[in-house]
Image (spheres, rainbow, N blue to C red):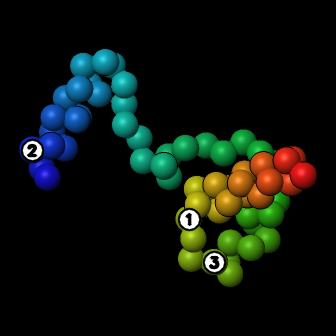
Amino acid sequence: MNKLKKIIRNIIDSMDYRAAPFSDMKIIDEEFEEIYEKCREYTVSSKVSLYATYKAIKYIIKQE
């Protein structure tokens, strides 16, 4: 697995991209931030996971 990881990292580096952990991503959505602040102490899910759930729910509502 380590060898594969090095190969992938070399490919990404050769294209001048940087692989960043999801936790480094900035989420700019005021409605989500408000919801997140209210429920973050009651969940073990990451902010990114909660944001994905939030976006999925918004998508479903939009389709109805």
Residue that carries the numbered disc 1 in the rendered image: 46
Closer to the chain start, of discs 3 and 2, is: 2
* Amino acid type for the residue under numbered disc 2: Lys
From the viewer's perspective, is the residue at label 1 or at label 2 nearer?
A: 2
Q: Residue furthest left?
A: 3
Closer mark to the observer between disc 3 and disc 2 = 2
Q: Residue furthest front?
A: 64
Circle 3 sits on which residue? Answer: 43
Does label 1 or label 2 sit earlier along the sequence? 2
Q: Amino acid at mark 3?
A: Thr
The residue lying at 68 percent from left, 72 percent from top is 40
Q: CA distance from mark 1 to mark 2?
A: 29 Å
**Residue occupied by mark 2:** 3
Specify few, some or many for label 2: CA neighbours under 10 Å numbering under 14, 14-19, or 20 or more: few
Nearest to the observer: residue 63 or residue 18: 63
Crowd class of label 3 (few under 14; some 14 to 19; many from 20; radius 10 Å): few
Q: Residue at x 24, y 19 (%)?
A: 14
Question: Label 3, label 2: how many angstroms apart (C-alpha)?
Answer: 36 Å
Identified by mark 1, the residue type is Ser
